[in-house]
Image (tube, rainbow, N blue to C red):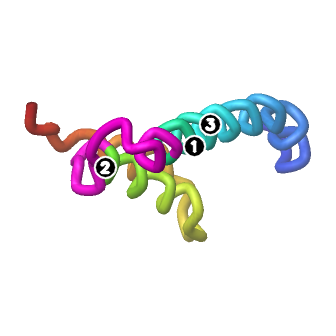
Amino acid sequence: MLTPAEVVDEYYLEVRCKLLEIAAIMDRYDRSVQRGDGEALGDDPRLKQCRESLAVLNSPQEEPNRAEQIALVFSHPVPA
Protein backbone atom coordinates (compact mmCIF):
# COMPACT_ATOMS: atom_id res chain seq x y z
CA MET A 1 0.00 0.00 0.00
CA LEU A 2 1.25 3.44 -0.92
CA THR A 3 1.18 6.40 1.43
CA PRO A 4 -0.79 9.48 0.33
CA ALA A 5 2.47 11.23 -0.60
CA GLU A 6 3.62 8.22 -2.61
CA VAL A 7 0.31 8.13 -4.51
CA VAL A 8 0.74 11.78 -5.49
CA ASP A 9 4.41 11.25 -6.37
CA GLU A 10 3.56 8.21 -8.50
CA TYR A 11 0.52 9.49 -10.38
CA TYR A 12 0.66 13.30 -10.49
CA LEU A 13 2.14 13.59 -13.99
CA GLU A 14 -0.25 11.01 -15.42
CA VAL A 15 -3.27 12.76 -13.89
CA ARG A 16 -2.07 16.15 -15.10
CA CYS A 17 -1.66 14.80 -18.62
CA LYS A 18 -5.14 13.26 -18.70
CA LEU A 19 -6.80 16.39 -17.31
CA LEU A 20 -5.02 18.57 -19.88
CA GLU A 21 -6.18 16.22 -22.63
CA ILE A 22 -9.79 16.44 -21.45
CA ALA A 23 -9.57 20.23 -21.23
CA ALA A 24 -8.16 20.41 -24.76
CA ILE A 25 -11.00 18.27 -26.14
CA MET A 26 -13.62 20.42 -24.42
CA ASP A 27 -11.89 23.57 -25.76
CA ARG A 28 -12.00 22.13 -29.30
CA TYR A 29 -15.72 21.53 -28.92
CA ASP A 30 -16.35 25.06 -27.60
CA ARG A 31 -14.28 26.66 -30.36
CA SER A 32 -16.17 24.66 -32.98
CA VAL A 33 -19.47 25.92 -31.58
CA GLN A 34 -18.16 29.52 -31.50
CA ARG A 35 -17.06 29.29 -35.14
CA GLY A 36 -20.52 28.13 -36.09
CA ASP A 37 -19.25 24.85 -37.51
CA GLY A 38 -22.45 23.18 -36.43
CA GLU A 39 -25.22 23.25 -33.90
CA ALA A 40 -24.21 23.11 -30.24
CA LEU A 41 -24.96 19.72 -28.73
CA GLY A 42 -25.81 21.06 -25.29
CA ASP A 43 -28.39 18.35 -24.67
CA ASP A 44 -26.29 15.50 -26.10
CA PRO A 45 -26.32 12.68 -23.51
CA ARG A 46 -22.63 11.95 -24.11
CA LEU A 47 -21.65 15.48 -23.14
CA LYS A 48 -23.96 15.26 -20.16
CA GLN A 49 -22.20 12.06 -19.03
CA CYS A 50 -18.80 13.72 -19.42
CA ARG A 51 -19.89 16.74 -17.36
CA GLU A 52 -21.44 14.53 -14.68
CA SER A 53 -18.17 12.59 -14.47
CA LEU A 54 -16.17 15.78 -14.06
CA ALA A 55 -18.52 16.82 -11.26
CA VAL A 56 -17.87 13.48 -9.52
CA LEU A 57 -14.12 14.09 -9.79
CA ASN A 58 -14.50 17.55 -8.29
CA SER A 59 -16.71 16.58 -5.35
CA PRO A 60 -15.39 15.78 -1.87
CA GLN A 61 -15.76 12.10 -1.05
CA GLU A 62 -16.45 10.41 2.27
CA GLU A 63 -15.46 7.10 0.69
CA PRO A 64 -13.01 6.68 -2.20
CA ASN A 65 -15.38 5.36 -4.85
CA ARG A 66 -15.11 7.92 -7.66
CA ALA A 67 -14.23 5.28 -10.24
CA GLU A 68 -17.38 3.32 -9.37
CA GLN A 69 -19.54 6.45 -9.50
CA ILE A 70 -18.15 7.42 -12.91
CA ALA A 71 -18.58 3.88 -14.20
CA LEU A 72 -22.24 4.13 -13.17
CA VAL A 73 -22.61 7.44 -15.06
CA PHE A 74 -21.32 5.78 -18.23
CA SER A 75 -23.30 2.56 -17.68
CA HIS A 76 -26.50 4.17 -18.92
CA PRO A 77 -26.97 3.53 -22.64
CA VAL A 78 -26.61 6.53 -24.93
CA PRO A 79 -29.31 6.75 -27.60
CA ALA A 80 -27.93 6.38 -31.12
Task: Say which element carries label 2.
Answer: loop
> What percent of the width, then of the height, locates residue 13?
83, 32
Task: Say which element carries label 3.
Answer: helix
User: Which amino acid type is marked by label 3?
Assistant: Ala
Nearer-N-terminus badge (2/1): 1
> What percent of the width, then of the height, locates residue 48?
31, 53
75 left or right of 51 in image: left
Q: From the image, tell me which residue sits under label 3.
A: 24
22 left or right of 19 in image: left
Label 2, label 1: how many angstroms apart (C-alpha)?
13 Å
Residue lying at 39% horizontally and 52% vertically, measured from the top left: 69
Q: From the image, tell me which residue sits under label 1.
A: 27
Task: Say which element carries label 1.
Answer: helix
User: Which amino acid type is marked by label 1?
Assistant: Asp
Asked if the magenta segment contains residue 68, the reply would be: no
Badge 3 vs badge 2, beta-carbon distance below 8 Å: no
Asked if the magenta segment contains residue 41, the reply would be: yes
Residue lying at 84% horizontally and 43% vertically, measured from the top left: 8
> What percent of the width, then of the height, locates residue 59?
55, 68
Badge 3 vs badge 1, beta-carbon distance below 8 Å: yes
The range drawn in magenta is: 31-46
Q: Is residue 18 above or below residue 69?
A: above
User: Which amino acid type is marked by label 2?
Assistant: Ala
Residue lying at 82% horizontally and 38% vertically, measured from the top left: 12
Q: Residue furthest front?
A: 36
Q: From the image, tell me which residue sits under label 2.
A: 40
> Could you classify mark 3 by the number of other residues whose Cα lies within 10 Å: few (under 14), some (14-19), or many (20 or more)?
few
Residue lying at 70% horizontally and 38% vertically, measured from the top left: 20
Label 3, label 1: how many angstroms apart (C-alpha)?
5 Å
Q: Is residue 17 above or below residue 65?
A: above
Work out which quarter of the rendered image holds the N terminus and state it.
top right
Location of residue 39 (image quadrant): top left
